[in-house]
Image: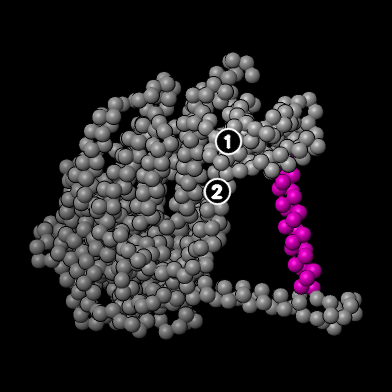
Amino acid sequence: MNASAISRNNFRLRFLSPSVAIGAGSCVVFSLEIMLAEWVALFWIFSCLAVLWATYRRSNEFFSYNFRLISTLLLISLAIAAHWAQGWQYVLAQALVLMLGIKLLELRTQRDCFQFCGLGVLGLGVSSLVRFDLGFGVMIFLFFFLGLVLTLWQHIVDQTGTNPESRNAGWFFPLKIMTFALFLTVMTIVLGLFLFFVFPRNINPMLNLSSGMNIHRTGFSPQMRPGSVGEIVLSGRVAFRATIDGDADPSMLYWRGAVLWETDGTSWKPGSPNDHRVRPAIASGNESGVISQNITLNPGRTEYLFGLFFPGMVQNYSPVYYSRDATIITRDPVDIAIRYQVYSRRSDKTELTPQELRAALDVPSALDPGVISLAREFEDVHDPWNRAQEVLKYFGTSGFEYSLVSPGGSGQGQTLASFLLETRTGYCELYAAATAVLLRLNNIPSRIVVGFMGGEFNPVGEYWVVRDSMAHAWVEAWFEDRGWVLLDPTAMLDGSAVDQAEQAWPSPASGEIIPEQLMSPGLRVVDWMRWQWTNAIIDLTPARQMRMWRSLRSGFQETWTGLSAPRANVSRNFPEGFSLSPVLGALIIGAGFIIVLWALKGRYSGMDRDQILRIRAWKRLSRKTPGRHELLTPGRERSILDWWERNHPDKALELKIIYHAQRYGPSPDLEKDKKLKSLLSGMYTRALPVND
């Protein structure tokens, strides 16, 4: 290798440690993205660019130690001041990423690498409080692989970085280290999966360390405050996945969560006039017109379970409680992934109770006079249904616009009056609140439903993915001849909504999945794997584990009994008393012996006999000399031979002659190899270690 090639090779190897460290740290950053502030992510990017620039400039220290220490303290103080209200876990996530960035700038020794990886492990631990998906598992795998490569390679750099003979090593050692790190990581994952499947686990967290975190884990909220845009989370996080057994219009997928009855003119809350009860509203899933859904719900810190239309019965999860307004709640908030089957009706024509009627017509006493005056414009229409349709058409013909951004000057506190009378720009919560108030002022019982609308269909697995960004609010109004009817004013804004006078909900199979509802082809298989992983975690309960291992044990016993027991048809081909058990054992031992021979042969693949004998010579000398020695480089055995001369002078000369002839001579052979082995075996002693 010429000098130019060596220089280029050393230049590339110089970037190995920082590049691997950046990859490992980025795994931690990506796993914490749901909790990470933008300025902290930008600081990590700055640290990555800075360490690459310092490596290029051959700078041993990008910033002084005192500067790094003061910067760390200041940045952590800033994280505490800015994010303490969101929970100590949130602050810890910011602090760990900041310390990772600072530590990245001072990676010099293996000790620094150990500290860097330790911070990364803590970061993954914090991320585990809020993440439970396959992508997080991939981040863990990559982090441990890259962390092993980083620490092992830095050890080589620390030991041989100043040795002139090591500068021309090329990529031999890095590739060997990567191979070993990959093997060790895979074995660790296999062991982890084995322990996961073998040992019983509590499906509930022993330490609820994620409690008190003020971070948005779902776009759903059982309360609504028009004017607060922050209640809607614009994120791609999956709220739940669902399969639908039955016909449902893909364009009208309204996933019911909470029903809001009470309002003070600004905010809405459930305030249901009915208590939740244990008895379900649907007696059997075999009823006519009932739609079944299997829902895998991700942790959302809410006690509400979701279902299409009017859900009335839940199976495979308990305890649950039902209300007359078709809401279903659990005893405690759902903070782990669960799966349940829910049955829903398309309509609800039950009569209103006096309590429900009062709650559905109640309006605040302090309403803006302009809102009351606007409601009176619809009094000329006498039929309640037609009057409700006129209210909906008002939003589609009066210049209203849908926007998640509050108009200029209104900040985040746009009121109902300012929305209806001035800005005419808002989002689903404002439209739902305005519609419900106008209907109530026109003596039409109404309530607000919050949940999710729509979904993203994955043909791989044939299920719907509902995300946080699909959180929605709509109105249900009660009519004497129709019952509760869906009224969604936001559907009127584009002028494409059909007259909702036919029935409460669209008829079965009234639409097909449009291309915009299909999941991107590149994400389908990955999302399906995440879905299957979540289902596997949910299914693997302690009871299922015990059944699985009992089944495996009984199956093994039956197989072994069948192989070892004499049979009538076997006796015709084998001598009497013949058993397959010894034969089977011999086959297993023989297969193991062949594998060992194959592995030993693979150690010297591609070498001729002389090369193998030369390698065997220095390995024999290294193993039989007290201490640890690396004799791969020629000439390194001088101090070892001197030790043999001091401790075994009678035979040391013969050992030296045979060793040099076997390793450096023109023709190593098996006879000298046997003599070398005999000499070393006879002279081996546990004397004092060699002083290199």
Amino acid at the residue labelled 2: Leu
Q: Residue furthest top?
A: 3
Residue for badge 2? 184
Give the camera-side residue of 657 and 99. Answer: 657
User: In 3D space, how far apart are the residues under numbered discs 2 and 1 (Cα atoms)?
Assistant: 24 Å
In percent of the image, x 21 and y 41: which residue is there?
A: 77
The kind of residue tagged 1 is: His
Q: Is residue 584 magenta?
A: yes
Q: Nearer the viewer, mark 2 or mark 1?
A: 1
Decide which of 123, 243 is in the foreground and name it: 123
At 35% from the left edge and 77% from the top edge, which residue is drawn?
Answer: 320
The residue under the point 52% across, 75% down is 546
What residue is shown with label 1? 629
175 in magenta: no
Q: Secondary structure at mark 2?
A: helix
Of mark 2 and mark 1, the one earlier in the sequence is 2
Where is 159 relative to 564, above or below? above
The quadrant where residue 194 appears: bottom right
For residue 447, the mark is: none
Residue 410 percent location from the top left of the image: 17, 46
Q: Position of residue 568 (x, y in %)?
A: 85, 83
Highlighted range, magenta: 580-604
User: In the image, what residue occupies the spot 76% across and 26% down?
Assistant: 665
Specify whether residue 668 is in view: yes
